[in-house]
Image (spheres, rainbow, N blue to C red):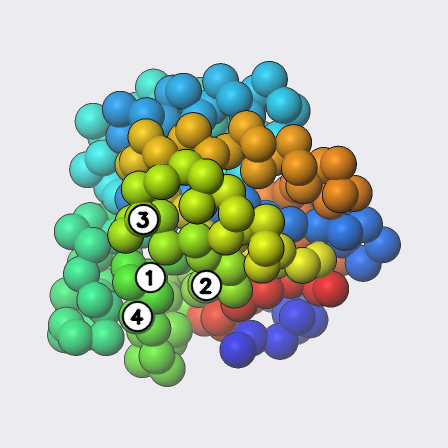
Amino acid sequence: MGSLVAPAHAAVPERGPDCLVSRCVALTFDDGPSPYTATLLTTLERQHVKVTFYVIGPHALARAQDVKRAFRDGDTIGDHTVHHPKLTKISSAHVRYELDTAARQIASITRQRPTELRPPFGAENARVRALAGRLGLSVVMWNVTPRDWKHHNAALVEKRVLDKVRPGAIVDMHDTYRSTIAAVPDIVATLKKRGYTLVTVPQLFAQTGGLKAGEAYFHGPS
């Protein structure tokens, strides 16, 4: 687990709420964009919420308008590889290809290379962290997941998120399932009622020095 305090040369933190004071939660979405992403973006815009998307490079190219829209909204766009492999099971050269190619694909849309990696399946180790670090990527994991990839039930997704969330949580969901998209409005509304501030991952760490390339992070300050 990475330190909450990143040393010098960390990525410049994004401005936002002080998560050492506010009860912050970062909602994150993997594997998109998908046919459902535009609906999710409309929900987030209406509720004035920013999130973090970890996109697959070719999916981003196929739905570039959704990526541009999210980026314009202030959502963070992170790297989720090209082919979604278990990075711990492939060669270092293949890891570099997956990370750098997806980063370049994303940058061709946003004009900004991503600085965060969400490893597929959460498969990371010291080698993956080191390789990511050389490409300027921090490794962002999570500590709350409704396992929405397995349970395509909006009510269950909502319950599992709300039961597990605590200040500093990083919530892992997927914008590739209609059921997850359906759960988001009530998740957001309930979290706000409970006094949580919803932030991007860079905002979550802004007051603790930002995210350092090559380090893994499972949760923010609580």
Which residue does the numbered mark 2 point to in the structure image? 141
Where residue 128 sits, quadrant-wise, is bottom left
Q: Report if the CB atoms under discs 4 and 1 are less than 8 Å apart.
A: yes
Label whose residue precedes the other's in the sequence (4 or 3): 4
Quarter holding residue 29: top left
Residue 173 x/y as whole percent: 41, 47
Q: Residue at x 45, y 57 (%)?
A: 145
Q: Which residue is mark 1?
A: 119
Query: Which residue does the image show at 47% across and 34% down from the upper left?
Result: 183
Q: Nearer the viewer, mark 1 or mark 3?
A: 3
Q: Tell me which label, 1 or 3, sits earlier in the chain.
A: 1
Amino acid at the residue labelled 1 = Pro
Quick check: 86 above or below 118? below
88 on left or right of 12: left
Q: Between 129 and 41, which is closer to the camera in this rendering? A: 41
Q: Is residue 26 left or right of residue 52?
A: right
Question: Which residue is denoted by mark 4 in the rendering?
Answer: 123
Q: Position of residue 123 (x, y in %)?
A: 30, 70
Element type where label 1 sits in the image = loop
Whole-number angstrom distance, CA of label 2 to CA of label 4? 9 Å
Q: Tell me the CA gap for discs 4 and 1.
A: 6 Å
Q: Which residue in the structure is indicated by mark 3?
A: 151
Type of the residue with mark 4:
Ala
Please rate how many residues cluster around mark 1, counting C-alpha atoms within 10 Å: few if below 14, some from 14 to 19, many from 20: many
